[in-house]
Image: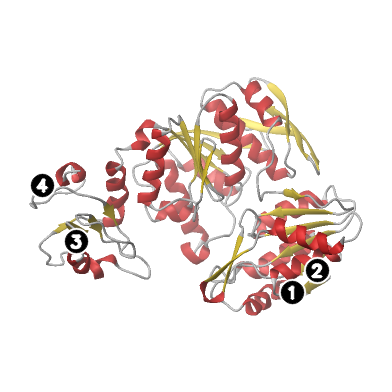
Amino acid sequence: MKLYDLIDGLAQTTLENIEITDITSDNRKDLKKGAMFVCIRGNTFDGHSVAGEMLEKGASCVVVQKDLGLEKQIIVDDSREIYPALCAKWFSNPQKKLKLIGVTGTNGKTTITTVIKKVLTELGAKVGLIGTCQNEIGDKILHTDRTTPEPYDLYKLLAQMVEEKCEYTVMEVSSQALEQKRVGPLHFDIALFTNLTQDHLDVHGTMENYYRAKKLLFSMCDKALINIDNDSGKRYLSEIDCEKYSFSTTEKADFYAYDIKLSASGVEYSFNDGEETLPVKFNMPGQFNVSNSLAVIGCLVKLGYNAKEVIKLIDKTSGVRGRAEVVPTGRDFTVICDYAHTPDALVNILSAIKSCSEGRVVCLFGCGGNRDKTKRPLMARAAAEHADFLIVTSDNPRDEDPDEIIKDILTGLEGKNVPYITITDRIEAIHWAVKNAKKDDVIILAGKGHEDYQILPGGVKIHLDEREVVAEALAELN
């Protein structure tokens, strides 16, 4: 692509209209000769510091937001903001050829996006998905390293979806991606908000900053669908300017649920949109899954689909990997794998299971290293309030001592009467849980969910699929 075509409407330059062979902001990857290098200032590394080096390695030009005195520089106001716009152009603006559905919030994003994709597929559409567990193009599954990809990867993925003739893309939109301007010129047909509870304060610093980061999504959409069962949702609804709708499981809204019945196998309720009342069954347990399924119905109705048809398909939808996922045991106790890694998410899954459990609720959990430390005692308190026995272990300790993380967690158990055990090694902890299970126990493996790895100190990444660990522990029992 010619330089002038790439920067048209984004930047100006007196450089020669050369051919650009690629575009990147990552100096760690092999640089293609003739590529454009975009210098972005991050928290720990500033791309401007290697601008000259990139030119020496063969870059045709560098995009900077300050004058570095280089012969082949293009100066812009905000290189971080312009980079995704350049990526969109590089891939021929694929976002303009797709109907985009964005979902943000602390909890529920993966379940909602996954179910929306499943229902739309059953309705005859080809759908792409971008999310925490994996990316999908129709039936094709692609690996992902983060909830919302880096700009180049994001627009490359969208271009693949266009090439594969997808009609929709449904994506989880993280607060970090919004704050870091990674999504660029995306414009969503509809954007959904689930809830806001304490998470990512290591990134945002305060809950107010976290709130504002999420709010950015609603300046990038035609319609918004907001959960008003939390104060943040009510505040968004009063502050945003786009066409907006509400959903609730506790009060009347544009879409609301009542006569709610909860069981270990799922939820049932009556759906109302102000015009008709319809019965709903959804095969995932917990009050929070009433809200998740309600969001799916409201979203698809606002996209023009018939509520009765959507509800019929939701009833047939299977569960989501790592979200209240029952792991087969063939024994007289149950193991559930769930991604709950915030206090609120832990309360949701534990209270949902506690309400319909005949035996003990055993919660195995830890907290991630290099993340918000204030969350650790809060996780412990949440678990203590809703479980009968706790197994405190590791999550992803990363660069921290896992035993020190556990000490932080245990401060939240001071004054609590719930019995507990600490086992630092997560694999060993799961084996202990299975071997010591009693009849009718429900063991909740919280925190890892869909993940099949663990990040240990020193950056060591090991394979850890909790389903496999449970199977190994069961084999030893047998």
* Label whose residue precedes the other's in the sequence (3 or 2): 3
- The answer to whether 229 is drawn above or below residue 242 in the figure is below
Residue designated by label 3: 58
**Residue most extreme to the right:** 439
> How many residues crowd mark 2 within 10 Å: few (<14), some (14–19), many (20+)?
some
Q: Are marks 2 and 1 in contact (CB under 8 Å)?
A: yes
* Label whose residue precedes the other's in the sequence (2 or 1): 1
Camera-side mark, 2 or 1:
2
- The answer to whether 458 is drawn above or below residue 75 in the figure is below
Please state the horizontal and vertical placement of residue 326, each as a whole percent of the image.
Answer: 75, 49
Q: CA distance from mark 3 to mark 2?
A: 56 Å
Please state the horizontal and vertical placement of residue 218, each as a whole percent of the image.
Answer: 44, 41
Q: CA distance from mark 4 to mark 3?
A: 17 Å
Q: Are marks 3 and 2 in contact (CB under 8 Å)?
A: no
Work out whether residue 274 can be spotted. no
Q: Tell me the tag on residue 395.
A: none
* Label whose residue precedes the other's in the sequence (1 or 3): 3
User: Of the residues shown, which amino acid type is indicated by label 1?
Assistant: Ile
Q: Residue at x 65, y 36 (%)?
A: 293
Camera-side mark, 3 or 2:
3
Location of the C terminus by quadrant is bottom right
Q: Are marks 4 and 1 in contact (CB under 8 Å)?
A: no
Helix, strand or loop under label 1: loop
Camera-side mark, 1 or 3:
3
Name the residue nearer the viewer: 478 or 109: 478
Q: Tell me the tag on residue 17.
A: 4
